[in-house]
Image (cartoon, helix red, strand yellow):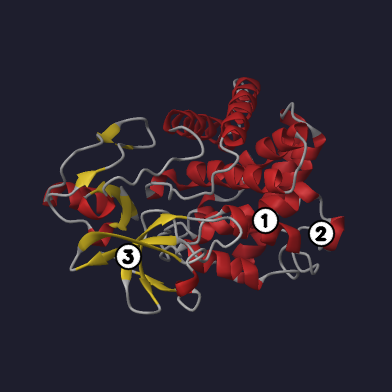
Amino acid sequence: MRYITTDKLRPGQRLANSLALSNRTLLLRRGKELTPALIRKIGALGYQGLYIEDELSEGLEITDVISSDLRRKTRNELQLLFLNVSTNSTGNIKKHFNTLKSLSKKIVEQVVRNRTTMINLVDLRAYDDYTYSHSLNVAVVSIIIGMALKLSHSSIQELAIGALIHDIGKMRVDKGILNKPDKLTPEEFEHMKQHSRLGYEYLLNNADISENSKIATLYHHERMDGKGYPEGLSGENIPLYSRIISVADVYDALTSDRPYRKAMLPSDAIEYIMGGFGTAFDPDIVKAITKKVAPYPIGTCVRLSNDEIGIVVRNYEETSLRPAVKLIKDNKPTSTIVDLTHDRSMLHVTVKEIINL
């Protein structure tokens, strides 16, 4: 299987993963052959890309760090919780928080079980599913960073629940500003910046979770250089969970399609984060994410600096920019695999760019 962007989908290709809408409705089953009508529908729903099975990716299996069923259940529960918060409904709030705490423990268990796995899978989501998928992805990336930093299991549990609800304060922001498709005015941005404090205040009064998890949501927009918000904290005065969530939040936001901009490639998003080393982001956390998130996920087609074309088949934590690549000739896979990390004859060869085939 391999990931390709929606604009490169062609009739006759087959889905490698089932697609479900945010309301739990199954859209397309795995193995479904794409038609022109289905491709138009997928594009209209806002999917930025899909996983397909074809000759180029034959034999490649990409495993997510958590199960699709757990992803679906967590997104649905986040949707219910956020709906209650936005409508000021308090009847089921305790139940939703308890369910989410239970789900967060399962997420941690599954990620820990896959402790050697780099993040290679691009999350498939539609525009209307962004908020809930984003919250879940930030939690998964935060957990993986926490593991890389060797946090205790109990600390990772606290981090996970804080990451899942880091944006809960946005449900208290004016909906016209929250859903605006264009760039915010300075006044609107000042209003939007209140979401972290609004979320924290809501959690103080309504959520039976640890104070550390609540605090994590308050300071996840602070910067190492003191130029963040809401309080302009700097360096280690920013709580560790908040520093972790900050990096995970930016990474997932950058790699997501939005109505007003296209998603960045994972490699470009990682480079952006590296650019904030020590200014926007904690250096140790930047180092951790560059090891655990694959810039060139398995199944990605790339052009090498020697103009060879291939598909990524393996990644390495310590040298994530130098994957193993199966070469492609005349749009057909070959049996030749070049390992940019371990093949001494390839020391001067790099990945030049990601391509769509």
Residue 171 shows in this picture:
no
Q: Secondary structure at mark 1?
A: helix
In this view, the residue in front, 119 or 82, is 119
Q: Which residue is mark 1?
A: 288
In this view, the residue in front, 48 or 89, is 48
Which mark, by number, is residue 231? Answer: 2
In this view, the residue in front, 333 or 28, is 333
Disc 2 to disc 1, how far (Cα)? 26 Å
Q: Is residue 258 above or below residue 23?
A: below
Mark 3: give few (<14), some (14-19) or many (20+) Cα within 10 Å. Answer: many
In the picture, the quarter occupied by the C terminus is: bottom left
Residue 23: where, in percent of width, then height? 37, 32
Q: Secondary structure at mark 3?
A: strand
Q: Which residue is mark 3?
A: 310
Tell me the kind of residue under disc 3: Gly
Determine the residue positioned at 44% across, 48% down. 121
Which mark, by number, is residue 77? Answer: none
Horizontal relation, residue 255 to residue 280: left or right? left
Disc 3 to disc 1, how far (Cα)? 27 Å
